Image (cartoon, rainbow, N blue to C red):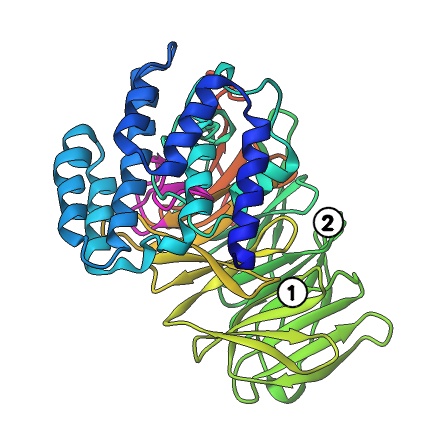
Amino acid sequence: MDAKSRIANLRALEVYRRYDTPLCLLLLSQILSGLWSECIITIGTIRGLEERSKKAAVFLVRRQQFLELVGMAGHLQAAKHVLRNKIYPQNESEIAVQELLLQLHNPKRAIAIESWVPQRLGLFLYLTEVIPSWIYYPGNRSAETLELFLTTQHRPSFMNPTWCEQKEIPSVCIQVEDMGNDGILLVKFSNTGKYLASTSTNCTATIWMIDDNDTISLKYNLVGHRRPILSVEWKSDDTELITCAEGEDAKLWDVDTGTCKLTFRMPMNVRVKACAWSHNPDKIFFGSCKPDNFIYTWNADDNMLQPMYLIPEVSDLVVTPSPRLICVCSDNIVRELGFTGGLKYEMEKKDVIAPVSLSKYGNLLILNVNYEEIHVWNTNTHSLEHKYRVGKQDCILGACFGGSNSSFIASGSKESEIYIWHRLHEMPIKTLSGHTMPVNSVSWNLAKPHMLASGSSDGTIRIWVVSSKCEKRLFTSKKQKV
């Protein structure tokens, strides 16, 4: 028995011990044995199971059966039979069925025989989220079991939306800030969640205060750039804000007074395109445009800009807690750099679109690929974790993490809608409508995970909150143009 098989058996034993009730053990035994029809019969005998949850559980079981058949040589016809006669007649989601149909012609997500045990355990733990908790051992899952669930190599892409805590998703618009004819390019909450920064096509940035009732109110308009501001960066304590307009020098603003404290004069007329604040608050990184395409560092101690790396033009950069610097470059290669020099690794992608975004703890990175997919990379293992799409031909814009523990991903789109995914679900579980033109940017308040902001070419900023936090009226205001 190889090491992988021994680990799988130990995990199976752990799950058996944890879910030690007759009905639960019967269900688990049927899943591990691949007795799919018997498993579905058992699910049908569970009292108190809602019809919607039952359909979700049956789909997960049949999906597992289908992908195992796809992964077995010579069983393609059997897989088609399951899809045509077992899954399609019982499933209401055409998107989920279409996704499985694609696996027949591109079986990269098929389940190999050597992965059956851990994947079947993952299926069982998924089922425990949609079936009543009384059938398994009382108490919450242990950390080890939860880790097993999250680290299985393959996760079913279909998830009943009722499994996700819908109450955690900001889905009610409580405020609309109308900026007139000035389209909104960017919105970004501060680190402490007390402020929101926005930029617009009129070449200004705005600092908004977050009020106690989760609405926003104008604090300062930041005037000084001559071109639209495409990047902003908050200092860790929210006392300062950096703005970058392509082709211009970056500016440092005092949040308390709204005044420009410093203009970063780049050498040889080099202009800044993106910036990132180090976890050391006295150090800032700048990605410059042509002609030299350097990454520069600025230190508060000597107030000097120093060239650090010579790489292709940087469209965006972020700093991880490691600490490492991750850059998206014009050659569509995502580079990870050490602070003291040296190329760590490269991830070559096709048309990687800025901006990029990190999860709350910096271990996951969002990349927008071709405006069609959101890719999430693990910054520790340098591996691709997930891909996310919308179910129609739409262009995804400005994605970010959100919710408690970065459980969700939100994105704007050219079709004026906001899409929200759960991290374990490849298709959106929520769509927010209200904007009338492309939603260029969304920002989830990580300090107040019930709050989301969106900015659109229609000239409005919208504030979204979870339903339990919203008031019954919609607050609308129009900002004076500057």
Indicate the position of residue 328 as horizontal and vertical percent values. Answer: 51, 71
Indicate the position of residue 205 as horizontal and vertical percent values. Answer: 57, 54
Q: Amino acid at mark 1?
A: Ala
Circle 2 packing at 10 Å, graded few (<14), some (14-19), many (20+), is: some
Indicate the position of residue 337 as horizontal and vertical percent values. Answer: 64, 75
Q: Is residue 184 visible?
A: no
Q: Which mark is residue 398?
A: none
Of all residues, the one furthest to the top in this rendering is 47
Q: Which residue is mark 2?
A: 238
Looking at the image, residue 246 lies above or below residue 47: below
Give the residue drawn at x 47%, y 25%: 25
- Between 34 and 475, the one lying in front of the other is 34
Identify the element where label 2 is drawn.
loop
User: Viewed as shown, does residue 375 lie left or right of 41?
Assistant: right
- Between 321 and 251, the one lying in front of the other is 321
User: Viewed as shown, does residue 104 lie left or right of 215?
Assistant: left
Rendering quarter of residue 160: top left
Rendering quarter of residue 335: bottom right
Of all residues, the one furthest to the right in this rendering is 301
Give the residue drawn at x 57%, y 20%: 137
Magenta span has 420? yes
Identify the element where label 1 is drawn.
strand
Give the residue drawn at x 20%, y 35%: 87
Circle 1 packing at 10 Å, graded few (<14), some (14-19), many (20+), is: many
Specify start and end residues of the magenta stretch as a single range: 413-437
Foreground label between 2 and 1: 1
Q: Which residue is mark 1?
A: 276
Q: Amino acid at mark 2?
A: Asp
